[in-house]
Amino acid sequence: MKISKDTVKHVAKLARLGLTDDEVEKFSGQLSDVFDYMDILEEVDTSGVKETSQVTGLENVSEKDEIIKREEGLLGASELPVESNQILVKAAIKKQ
Amino acid sequence: MAKLNELTIREVADGFRAKKFSSEEVTKDCLKRIKERNEEVNAFVLVDEGEALRMAREIDKSGFGGGAKDHILKGVPVGLKDILNTRGVKTTCCSPGLRDYVPPYDATVVEKLRGAGMVMVGKTNMDEFACGASTEHSCFGVTKNPVDLTKVAGGSSGGSVAAVADDMSIYALGTDTGGSIRQPASFCGTYGLKVTYGRVSRSGVTALASSWDTVGPIGKSVEDLAIVLGTIAGRDRKDMTTPDVAVPDYTKFLGKGVKGLKIGLPKEYFGDGIENETRDVVMKAVKKLEKEGAKLVDVSLPMTKYAISAYYISMPAELSANMERYDGIRFGKKASEKATGQIKDLVDQYFVVRGEAFGDEIKRRIMIGTYVLSAGYMDAYYKKAMKVRTKIIEDFGRAFEKVDVLIGPVSPFPAFGIGEKADDPLAMYMADALTIPASAAGVPSLACPCGESESGLPIGLQVIAPQFQEGLCLRVGEVV
């Protein structure tokens, strides 16, 4: 399947991934090859087969609801300015 | 006597207890080897000599007298893949976006090794975020194969494996999602174990594909793997995917031989696409097991050829979701000075930060993953892959009704040249053709060196067992 440059740009937008023009060009070709190869799965008859997302059969694992003391300093891992225990970021909503 | 850095865990531990040498001396020999070789091999991306020696001296001071605190790993130098969070020590995942990241807490496996009295000599190189099969996708440069410096060490745990193969550390930890411990182990001629999914906690281990990722040991002998596995395995309330399955003393499985065991040889692992030399070397080792009393049985895993495709849909899908957290806000690199001017709002910030943070292969996989999860393609790709995964699991189920373990080559070919597949992602993905199926089924698989090619490159075989039967892998692997 051909992955066009427009599709690459669209997917990059969904993924919030800044790509250069060179990268768009390169990925268009490479992803086309990869998806061509994946079409091999069409050979497999999967009618009536269940999907697997967990392989050891665990489900609904629960734990006592209690606080485990974590190391301090999680905020210290941010490179952005911290104000009253919150990280300062650019505005998400535009002023009218 | 061999140099101290060339010894196994068992030999080092015995030496400590016989007062033949100290942890400081073993650590110094490892550090000396690193100094001599690391510039070329590039197995370690971070070495803190002072801290390693401090740890070793402290351990020497407390002695090796016995008691509950006297763990067999006490004072034994280890290399940790740079994806395992180490409190206060940089953990970069070899990504530009995490180059200066210092985690505020330890991964559970690191905590366990600390509790055992480890001496960490350093953090090891890897493909960025464990995405790759050659350790060429690292922001610190490629890890070279210590056996032949023109070849790759394999990946993504190439640094951990090269460190052990080149005697820079006594053992190491790596991660294996689709082959990332086994394939480099076979390329460099060491032992490496991919555990059952959930056998070892992944708390504090940066996630690649959450339904596939495992943490496992790399060592110079099967016994060493048994020792380390027994230390790091088990239920962890910080990782809900670790079932409450008892952790046996894995060394008890050793020394039992293979008499009476049924070994399955999947025909797909010896067929098309496998280099003749690799096939011949592995078969020779299998014949030896037959001589030791094992019974060889031909089996088939017909889904083998579809495993790569299913994996390269499922894994990037999970990766793209896991990577959503890299926004340069809570941790990781913020936007560079020169790009700051382009940022008007929060969304711009995501584009810029993520564009700068990730290397090629991560971007490629985020793109694949986002695409297969996007509207209109979810059923055709993602759900299809998850159904094929079910069929891969059924393959193993049928095979294990007939045999105790399965054996095949780890990789279709020995280590390839540096740069040879760097611009051809599909060719690179083929390197995992025989390791992905066991990952898909969540079963353990042990990579053992079993010979070499005519040009002197190591060739490895893998012993695959049913879930939570790591002991069986080790028992067979010891005889290989």
Image (cartoon, rainbow, N blue to C red):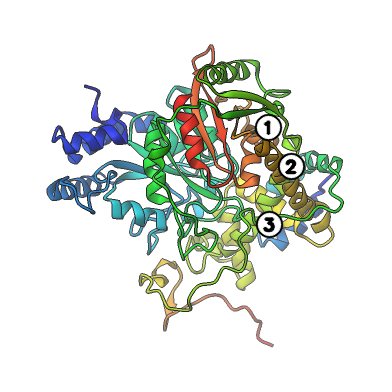
Identify the image quadrant of residue B409.
top right
Which mark is in front, 1 or 3? Answer: 3
Left or right: where does residue B272 sit relative to residue B431? right
Of the residues tagged 3 and 2, which is closer to the observer? Answer: 3
Q: Which of B306 and B27 is in front in this view?
A: B306
Is residue B344 visible in the rendered image? The answer is: no
* Amino acid type shown at disc 3: Ser
Q: Can residue B283 be seen in this view?
A: yes
Mark 1 residue crowding within 10 angstroms, few (<14) / some (14–19) / many (20+): few
Report which residue position mark 1 lands on. Answer: B427
**Front residue of B347 and B36:** B36
Q: Where is residue B292 in the image (x, y as percent from the top left)?
A: 50, 19
Q: Which amino acid does label 2 sit on?
A: Ser
Vertically, is B476 above or below B240? above
Residue labelled with disc 3? A53
- Of marks 1 and 2, which one's residue comes earlier in the chain? 2
How many other residues sit within 10 Å of disc 2, few (<14), some (14-19) or many (≥20)? many
In the displayed structure, A50 sits above or below B168; it is: below
Q: Report in which chain the residue with disc 3 lies.
A: A
**Helix, strand or loop status at disc 2:** helix
